Image (spheres, grey):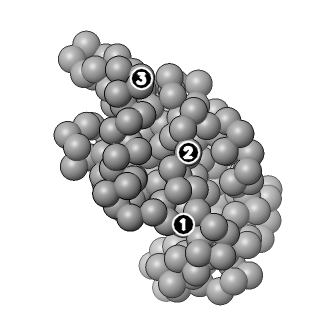
Amino acid sequence: MLIIGITGSIGCGKTYLANIIKKMGFAVYNPDKWVRDIYKKTEFLDIIKQNFPTTFENGVFNKRSLRNLVFDNKNQLQKLEQLIHPFLKKKIKKVINKFSRNADVIFFDAALLFEKNWDIYCDYIIVADIDEEIQKQRVMKRDNISEADFYKIIKVQISQAEKRAYADFIINTGEPENINKLQIMQFMDEIL
């Protein structure tokens, strides 16, 4: 079984590529989605409340407040990651073990693939790439954040240039979807 990581900095189009790959019939797993899902679990929110009490207002969790807190303070970010990433590592290993016997290829769509050393599980890495100005506009519009907040977010990720250097394959997501699909098909033909 081959494991292929899909990554890229926020707003570069990794999930867009993952959706194309899903339409092609491949299994794609998203650790970023798993993180969103754990924020829906009462027991995890209790842990967040214990460790980050200021992120609750009138007993209600405010994710934007948590994001502002951790992106303004590296120590707080590391503290949050220590709560989340063991769960993610366990989940990744579980998915790999489950599908290692009956799938030829699986994909992981993960923004922090390199930052969390999950690339060690991957045979190949695809990096979604886009011009930084387009990236910034996408993120600001999609997440309704300021330019300053955008730069806080990308500051905690390794640079897009570094991700490109580690990539086995780079796809410019500014191209039309049919071009990106053709690029993915060519890549899959090469590795399979």
Q: CA distance from mark 2 to mark 3?
A: 14 Å
Q: CA distance from mark 2 to mark 1?
A: 15 Å
Residue type for callout 1: Gly
**Pointer 2: residues within 10 angstroms few (<14), some, or many (20+)?**
many
Quadrant of image for the N terminus: top left
**Residue 11 appears anywhere in the view:** yes
Mark 1 sits on what residue? 11
**Pointer 3: residues within 10 angstroms few (<14), some, or many (20+)?**
few
- Is residue 87 shown above or below 146? above
Mark 3 sits on what residue? 191
Q: Is residue 38 left or right of residue 85?
A: left
Q: Nearer the viewer, residue 61 or 19?
A: 19
Q: Earlier in the sequence, mark 1 or mark 3?
A: 1
Q: Badges 2 and 3: C-beta atoms under 8 Å apart?
A: no
Residue type for callout 3: Ile
Q: CA distance from mark 1 to mark 3?
A: 27 Å
Mark 2 sits on what residue? 170
Q: Secondary structure at mark 2?
A: strand
Where residue 132 sits: x, y (%)? 67, 69
Point 59% across, 75% down: residue: 134
Q: Secondary structure at mark 1?
A: loop
Q: Nearer the viewer, residue 59 or 11?
A: 11
Q: Quadrant of residue 52?
A: bottom right
